[in-house]
Amino acid sequence: MTAIILFICGKKVSFRKSLFLMGIMGLDWGIQEAGIMESTNPRRLVTGFCGGLGLFSLYGLFLRYLSYKTIGNFRLSL
């Protein structure tokens, strides 16, 4: 929801930040999958929020890229 609001307002989350946010969720999954530590509900909430924001920010970047591709120049901010 936050990523959609940011997209509508025209705020940009960079590609690197989006990957970083998704990486936080992936790291939590990896730690849990390796059996190092069980994930708790508060951690799942935070990592799920970060992962969702990162994923939907990537969707926004992709949609912005497609729209600018048809209009003119576009530069992916890293």
Image (cartoon, rainbow, N blue to C red):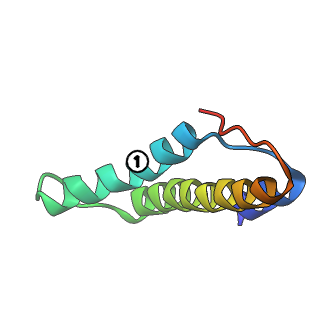
Label 1 residue SS = helix
Question: Residue most toward the left?
Answer: 35
Looking at the picture, does residue 43 appear above or below residue 19?
below
Position of residue 61 in the picture relative to residue 23 (left or right): right
x, y (%) of residue 41? 40, 65
Position of residue 11 in the picture relative to residue 78 (left or right): right
Residue labelled with disc 1: 24
x, y (%) of residue 64? 75, 56
Report the number of numbered marks: 1
Graded by Cα atoms within 10 Å as few (under 14), some (14 to 19) or many (20 or more), the crowding at tag 1 reads some
Question: Residue most toward the top?
Answer: 78
x, y (%) of residue 75? 70, 37
Position of residue 70 in the picture relative to residue 29 (left or right): right
Looking at the picture, does residue 20 appear above or below residue 45?
above
> Viewer-proximal residue, 25 or 66?
66
x, y (%) of residue 73? 79, 42
Give the quadrant of the N terminus.
bottom right
Q: Say which quarter of the image contains residue 30.
A: bottom left
Position of residue 56 in the picture relative to residue 35 (left or right): right
At 74% from the left and 44% from the top, the residue drawn is 12
Q: Say which quarter of the image contains residue 32.
A: bottom left
At 79% from the left and 57% from the top, the residue drawn is 7
Amino acid beneath label 1: Ile
At 80% from the left and 53% from the top, the residue drawn is 68
Give the quadrant of the C terminus.
top right
